[in-house]
Amino acid sequence: MVLPFTADVGIYETLLPNIDGFLLSGGQDIDPVRYGEDIIYGKAEELTPDREEVEYLIISFTHRYDVPVLGICREGDADDQCLLRRHAISRC
C-alpha cells in the first residue's frame, strides 16, 4: 500500500494500525535542521517537509507499537540520513 500525503492526520490514525510493516523509500535529503545542522545553500528547494512529517509519524508509530520498518537512506550524506532515522526511532 502506498500511503497518501495529507495534512489530515486522522487518515494515518485509521490506516497505520492495519499495516504489518513499512518501507520508507529513498529520495531527497532530509532537512538538516531536524538534526541540528544548517541548510546548505541551494539545497533548500530539494527538501520535502510534507514527506518528512509523514515519515516521522510512521517512525513514531512503528516504535510505539513495535512494527517493523525498513528505511532506505536518502540522498546526500547517507551516513547523516541513516543516523537521523535511527535517532528519530530512538526518540519516539
Image: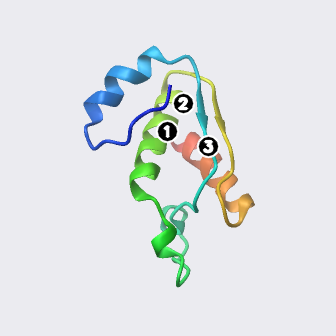
C-alpha span from label 1 to label 2: 6 Å
Q: At 57% across and 22% down in the image, what residue appears?
A: 67
Q: Which mark is residue 92?
A: 1
Query: Horizontal and vertical percent for residue 68?
Result: 62, 24
Q: Is residue 32 above or below residue 82?
A: below
Query: Horizontal and vertical percent for residue 63?
Result: 54, 30
| Near-viewer residue (47 or 17) | 47
Q: Secondary structure at mark 1?
A: loop
Q: Secondary structure at mark 2?
A: helix
Q: At 44% across and 33% down in the image, what residue appears?
A: 3
Say which label, 1 or 3, has the lower sequence index: 3
Say which label, 3 or 2, has the lower sequence index: 3
C-alpha span from label 1 to label 3: 20 Å
Q: Which mark is residue 25?
A: 3
User: Disc 1, disc 2: CB below 8 Å?
Assistant: yes
C-alpha span from label 3 to label 2: 18 Å
Say which label, 1 or 2, has the lower sequence index: 2
